[in-house]
Image (spheres, rainbow, N blue to C red):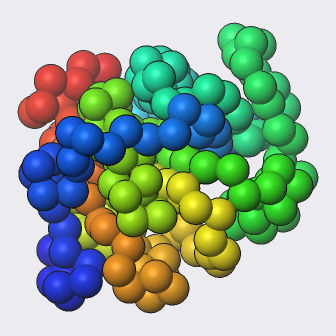
């Protein structure tokens, strides 16, 4: 795992970052970008057939959406995807095909600076309590980031105070985001950190109780 500077210290201990006296505002929007069509989770192609990868993706995103729905501070959940899935009855924003980061930036520009959580949909171990911890950390500091198991990516980004931020999801996104706000807390929590891209990721999730 990459070493963190003092201002970017990774913490998985709630008392260090989350004061029981601080609660997040209750007007958070959770934005969940989703891929559609064939070819998803391509790095699992040697281990799962296409239909099984699609089923895995669907199961994970439905789990994420369910956990987000249990967080009282989140009043709106929006999926960002080219077409609204038949199984989704909540808010939907069409992905115009400009790429992940431009799409997120365009959505934020169109909806103002209210508290925003951007979170990936491939987190099979996610728990609502972890999301709450991230939102409280953001409320305290203005913004907070949840990294992946390697400490290099960004699996969720919570912006509480309307600050400007150039989204840079992708390789080394933790460094990209943290460089813009060096004092932003970086949390490493098992459910938020466990995204599924590779066979090793899937094996780790299965050891932690996730079943295909």
Using the rendered image of the protein, determine whether residue 36 is visible from the camera's viewpoint: no
- In this view of the protein, can residue 14 be seen by the observer? yes
* Rendered image quadrant of residue 17: bottom left
* Relative side of 51 to 191, left or right: right
In the foreground, 155 or 17: 17
- Image quarter where the N terminus lies is bottom left
Q: Is residue 145 above or below residue 135?
A: below
Residue at x 21% of width, y 39% of height = 20
Measuring from the top left, give residue 202's x and y in whole percent. Answer: 26, 40
Instruction: Give 199 or 87, whichever is nearer the viewer.
Output: 87
Residue sitting at the far front: 21
Q: Is residue 51 left or right of residue 43?
A: right
> Where's the C terminus, which quadrant?
top left
Residue at the spot x=44%, y=25% of the render?
71
Residue 26 x %, y %: 54, 32
Q: Is residue 112 above or below residue 141?
A: above
Residue at 17% over, 85% down: 6
Horizontal side, residue 23 vs residue 107: left or right = left
Drawn side of residue 43 relative to residue 93, left or right: left
What residue is shown at x 34% (from left), y 28% (from top)?
128
Residue 192: percent from left, percent from top? 32, 45
Q: Is 80 above or below relative to 86?
A: below
How far from the left and from the top, in percent, is residue 3? 15, 83
């Amino acid at each position: 795992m990459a070493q963190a500077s003092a201002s970017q210290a990774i913490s998985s201990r709630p008392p260090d970052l989350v004061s029981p006296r601080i609660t997040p505002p209750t007007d958070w929007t959770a934005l969940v970008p989703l891929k559609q069509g064939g070819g998803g989770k391509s790095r699992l192609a040697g281990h799962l057939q296409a239909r099984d990868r699609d089923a895995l993706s669907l199961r994970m995103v439905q789990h994420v959406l369910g956990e987000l729905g249990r967080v009282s501070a989140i009043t709106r959940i929006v999926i960002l995807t080219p077409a609204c899935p038949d199984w989704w009855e909540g808010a939907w924003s069409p992905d115009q095909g400009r790429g992940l980061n431009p799409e997120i930036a365009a959505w934020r520009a169109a909806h103002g600076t209210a508290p925003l959580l951007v979170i990936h949909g491939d987190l099979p171990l996610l728990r609502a309590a972890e999301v709450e911890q991230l939102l409280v950390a953001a409320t305290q500091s203005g913004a907070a980031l949840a990294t992946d198991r390697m400490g290099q990516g960004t699996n969720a980004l919570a912006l509480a105070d309307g600050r400007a931020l150039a989204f840079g999801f992708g390789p080394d996104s933790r460094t990209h985001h943290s460089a813009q706000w060096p004092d932003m807390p970086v949390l490493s929590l098992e459910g938020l950190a466990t995204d599924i891209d590779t066979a090793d990721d899937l094996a780790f999730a299965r050891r932690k109780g996730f079943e295909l």
